[in-house]
Amino acid sequence: MRIFAERPFPRVRRRQPRRGAAAVEAAVCLPILVLFALGVVESCTCIYVRQGLTVAAYEGARVAIVPGATYENIEAQVNQILAQRNIRGAKIDVNPKSFMGQPFGSHVTVTVRAPANVNSTFRLDVFGDLRLRGETTMMTEY
């Protein structure tokens, strides 16, 4: 005589083996994750370059407001900052062009521009012809 006519728990069916499912999922997801990671790195590089251009413009403007400053002094200061931050292809613009002999309280603006694709980490040309810019305006002293 049997005590239990039926099993108290139903039998669990064994699942079919899923060989290769992880490889297919990785093949689908990995390119998207890699593309996302590259985009994040390139965006952070653009932010870093733009911040470097702003710092270089600020330091150039600090030189420009001192009496007796020349364009060569400003250019040397800006190029030193750009070299420290490894920023390439930058153009420097000082406004007004003849800032020497300006009266006290006049404004001097230093603008530094650089292309994003030249300063890119992976040289993927993601940003096309995007030009990054840093600019600072200060008042002359004395």
Image (cartoon, grey):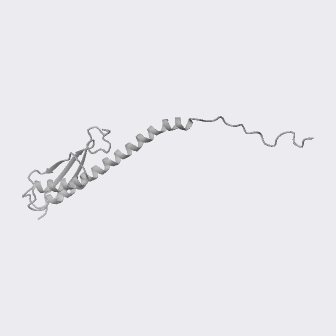
Residue 129 image position (x, y, % from top left): 26, 38
Residue at 38% across, 45% down: 40
Residue that lies at the very extreme toward the bottom in this rendered image: 142
Position of 40 relative to 60 (above/below): above
Q: Is residue 10 left or right of residue 17?
A: right
Of residue 68 and residue 29, the one placed in the foreground of this image is 29
Which quadrant, please, contains the N terminus? top right
Residue 69: image x %, image y %?
Answer: 10, 59
Of residues 101 and 81, the one drawn nearer to the viewer in this rendering = 81
Above or below, 56 relative to 89: below
Q: Depth check: give the residue in front, 6 or 99.
A: 6
Give coordinates of residue 60: x percent, y percent: 18, 56
Residue drawn at x 45%, y 41% as measured from the top left? 33
- Which residue lies most toward the left here? 101
Tag count: 0
83 vs 104: above or below: above
Residue 7, quarter of picture: top right
> Which picture quadrant has residue 56?
bottom left
Q: Position of residue 87 (x, y in %)?
A: 24, 49
Locate the C terminus by quadrant. Answer: bottom left
Taking the image as shown, residue 12 lies to the left or right of residue 53, namely right
Q: Is residue 24 above or below residue 135?
A: above
